[in-house]
Image (cartoon, helix red, strand yellow):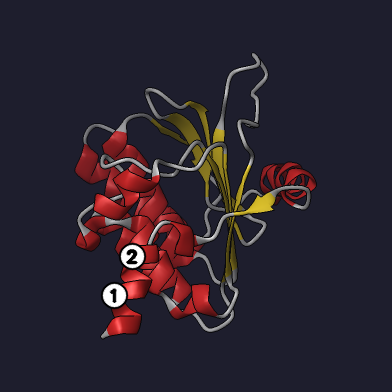
Amino acid sequence: MENLKEYSIAVKNFAANGIPYLFHNKGNEHALIIFENLFINAKSEIRIAANMLYNDEVVNTKTYIDAMRYFLDRRNSRLLIIITNRPPVIAVKGHDKETSFYWMLYNHPAYKNGRVVIKEGAGYYFRGDGGQQVNFCTCDSKMYRYESDIYQRKAEANFNDEYETIKLENKFNEVYKSLQEVRLEDFFEEEIEKNERA
């Protein structure tokens, strides 16, 4: 792909039509394009394994948040998240609410009715073939993005590969059941108290 616009058009087309193709992905802009198309094309279940799932380059952006909100607005959608470590409470509390991924999740009806579950690995992370930390996202047992270099956001993605996606989901599920749940209320206690006093 020669430029970002061409990349974006190709990803949108392949994602919407479920065309099996291995996209290579590097950097924040590519990551956002892939995530946006994963989220808006997912119908029922998304799994995310990440470090803290807290950064201003990708996660705390309007594009990422709006696409995830679009997915969660689907009546029976479910979002399962494993984070290696929880982000600092003071940073999450103090973040601009308009561009806070966790704030959006906390306020979405899907969180209130148990369709969003976040668990913390307390330092545990998924490893790639070289032992390095990897992040990944899967959708509906057929779409995935696998980030093999979390610093340069170097990844590959496919919008129709059941074999690789289910392998990642199985790894996720193995770990998920043994972890402690993260309560978003712990980040936003003051907001809760303000609402109760109002």
Q: Classify mark 1: helix, strand or loop.
A: helix
Q: Which residue is mark 1?
A: 194
Q: Are marks 1 and 2 in contact (CB under 8 Å)?
A: yes
Percent coordinates x, y for residue 103 in the rendering:
34, 63
Mark 2 is surrounded, within 10 Å at the Cα level, by few (under 14), some (14 to 19) or many (20 or more) other residues, namely few
Rendered view: 197 above or below 170: below
Residue 102, quarter of the rendered image: bottom left
Rendered view: 37 above or below 51: below
How many numbered tags mark residues here?
2
Q: Identify the residue at horizontal 31%, vertical 65% (top origin).
A: 66
Q: Which residue is mark 2?
A: 190
Q: Is residue 36 left or right of residue 144?
A: left
Q: Is residue 64 left or right of residue 83?
A: left
Q: Is residue 175 left or right of residue 70?
A: right
Measure the alpha-carbon separation of dots 1 and 2: 6 Å
Q: Identify the residue at horizontal 20%, vertical 45% (top origin).
A: 5
State the residue in front, 164 or 39: 39
Rendered view: 99 above or below 178: below
Residue 129, quarter of the rendered image: top right
Q: Amino acid at mark 1?
A: Lys
Q: Identify the residue at horizontal 55%, vertical 40% (top origin).
A: 136
Mark 1 is surrounded, within 10 Å at the Cα level, by few (under 14), some (14 to 19) or many (20 or more) other residues, namely few
Q: Amino acid at mark 2?
A: Glu
Q: Is residue 48 visible?
A: yes
Percent coordinates x, y for residue 164 in the rendering:
69, 42
Q: Classify mark 2: helix, strand or loop.
A: helix
Percent coordinates x, y for residue 69 in the rendering:
38, 69
Instruction: Give residue 52's mark.
Output: none
Percent coordinates x, y for residue 52 in the rendering:
46, 40
